[in-house]
Image (cartoon, rainbow, N blue to C red):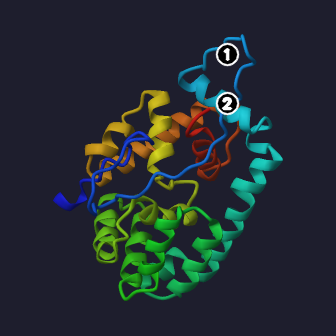
Amino acid sequence: MESFHPDVLIAEAHRVAPAGPRPFAQPLPWTAPRRPAAPAGRVPAPEPTGPAGLRARFLRRHPGGFADPVFRLTERAGRLEARRRLLRALSPAAAEAGTGDPVAALAALEAARLLAPADAEAAGRLLRGRRARAFLAAAARFAAGGTAAGLTAMHAAAAPDAAGRWPVLTAIPFLWRPDAHMLLDPGPAAEAARHLGHTLAGRLAVGGPAETYRALLQLCAELRAAVADLAPADNLDLLGLLRATAGPG
């Protein structure tokens, strides 16, 4: 399991990551709105902290919450269609049986626009390559609940293509089952963890893969509780929240 120690994926956005390829390593791209500058001579109100701060940052960008038309268009509608496309191309059962079309699954993943360019390129190498079916079979086992074994097998299939990155490993299980799984996008997830005082931030730096993923799901539960009045439908909504609140407020 030594190869599973992730890079310092949660290095603050302005810190340079260590050089050289590492398992689970990837850039930390995200975009979020900057907080408007206060008028001259006026001191801005302090930013709320904790769950209230996270909620305030989200509502500043999407005043209608998860029902906001812009949120539904940019974070939900296209990904739901991509999910339907993935299930038509490759169901978890077909993936575990070694049938289905990995390239069609890749097309659905690309349509979801979940991955940063470097991660999307890595996913393309993997799903067009000879280890694609082994990766997808492991992803199906992971989606069904075999977290540790599934992660180990997925990483073993992905590593030769330099695709053993958290977003690549978790994207397809997340699209198959957004009710139970989550895309691990380390930058936004770590920032939310810091807002909530959650252990995920530390686990991304030093934790093993199964423990890190379990911490991500625990963070999702805390996020859901923090915005329960906004009624998030599933982890597609929570991913949108993470990305909307990452970076400068």
Q: Is residue 6 above or below residue 134?
A: above
- Which of the image's four quarters has the C terminus? top right
Residue at point 29%, 77% (across, down): 160
Q: Is residue 79 above or below residue 89?
A: above
Name the residue at 24% across, 54% down. Answer: 5
**Label at residue 82:** none
Examine the rendering and report whether any part of residue 75 can be seen: yes
Crowding at mark 2 (Cα within 10 Å: few <14, some 14-19, many 20+): few
Residue nearest the observer in this picture, 44 or 192: 44
Res 104 → quadrant: bottom right
| Label disc, if present, on residue 44 of the rendered structure | 1
- Tag shown at residue 35: 2
Residue at the spot 50% in from the left edge and 74% down from the top edge: 92
Q: Position of residue 7 (x, y in %)?
A: 29, 52
Residue 1 seen by the camera: no
* Above/below status of 2 relative to 104: above
Where is residue 164, by image quadrant?
bottom left
Q: Of label 2 and label 1, which has the lower sequence position?
A: 2
Circle 2 — which element? loop
CB atoms of marks 2 and 1 within 8 Å: yes
Count of numbered badges drawn on the protein: 2
Of the residues shown, which amino acid type is indicated by label 1?
Pro
Structural distance between the alpha carbons of marks 2 and 1: 10 Å
Which amino acid lies under the numbered mark 2 shown in the image of this protein? Arg
The crowd level at tag 1 (other Cα within 10 Å; few <14, some 14-19, many 20+) is: few
Give the x, y percent position of residue 74: 73, 55
Is 238 on the left-hand or right-hand side of 130?
Answer: right
> Percent x, y for residue 125?
43, 80
Residue at the image position 67 percent from the left and 15 percent from the top:
44
